[in-house]
Amino acid sequence: MKIPPILVAGVLLAVVLAACSDGGSATPASVSPEADLTVTAEDNAFDQPTITLTAGEPTSVFFRNLDGAPHNIAIYSDDSASTSLFVGETITDDAVTYEIPALEPGEYFFRCDVHPDMVGTVVVEEA
């Protein structure tokens, strides 16, 4: 049986396009060239339980949300979450660059305000 050339060409085109495609993924870029560090939310957890910042310097944080649920990063003075130092925009299946203001040296608490069980520690060290 002879295969029509148009069918062969169509199959080859489909193979080439599939090989060159990113699969149509809506996953954000893995890093931001402008950011000082990257934090990712996936499977309702942060990829880093501790993030380190430099005291007295603002820090840009590229925040990637790989879940279908909304997440953010909020920094508080302690785990009572009564005094906020920074509250980032809540995003869903997206990415954002947060500008964290300069903080004093010490240890702070961070969490996702939507999912308060997603937590971590911010360590702010002298330069």
Image (cartoon, rainbow, N blue to C red):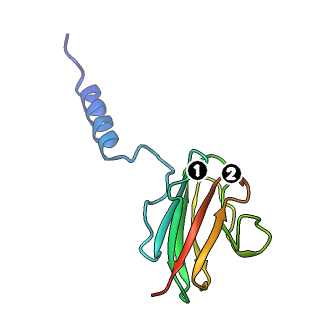
| Direction from residue 121 to residue 84 in the image, left or right | right
**x and y percentages locating residue 20 in the rendered image:** 31, 47
Mark 1 or 2, closer to the camera: 2
Query: Where does label 1 land, which residue?
Result: 45
Placement of 4 over or under 98, stated as above or below: above
Q: Counting other residues with Cα less than 10 Å from the Cα at mark 1, is it few (<14), some (14-19), or many (20 or more)?
A: some
In this rendering, the count of numbered labels is 2
Which residue sits furthest left? 2
- Residue at x 29%, y 30% (from the top left corner): 11
- Residue at x 54%, y 78% (from the top left corner): 124
* Of 93 and 44, the residue lying toward us: 44
Quarter of the picture holding the C terminus? bottom left
Q: CA distance from mark 1 to mark 2?
A: 8 Å
- Residue at x 66%, y 48% (from the top left corner): 69
**x and y percentages locating residue 26 in the rendered image:** 51, 50
Q: Secondary structure at mark 1?
A: strand
Q: Give residue 104's quadrant in the image.
A: bottom right
| Direction from residue 80 to residue 100 in the image, left or right | left
**x and y percentages locating residue 54 in the rendered image:** 50, 82
Q: Counting other residues with Cα less than 10 Å from the Cα at mark 2, is it few (<14), some (14-19), or many (20 or more)?
A: few
Query: Which amino acid lies under the numbered mark 2 shown in the image of this protein?
Result: Asp
Q: Give residue 122's quadrant in the image.
A: bottom right
Query: Which amino acid lies under the numbered mark 1 shown in the image of this protein?
Result: Ala
Q: Give residue 63's quadrant in the image.
A: bottom right
Which residue sits furthest front? 106
In the rendering, which numbered label is found on residue 91?
A: none
Q: Secondary structure at mark 2?
A: loop
Quarter of the picture holding the N terminus? top left
Placement of 124 over or under 73, stated as above or below: below
N-terminal-most mark, 1 or 2: 1
**x and y percentages locating residue 65 in the rendered image:** 57, 55
Query: Where does label 2 land, which residue?
Result: 117
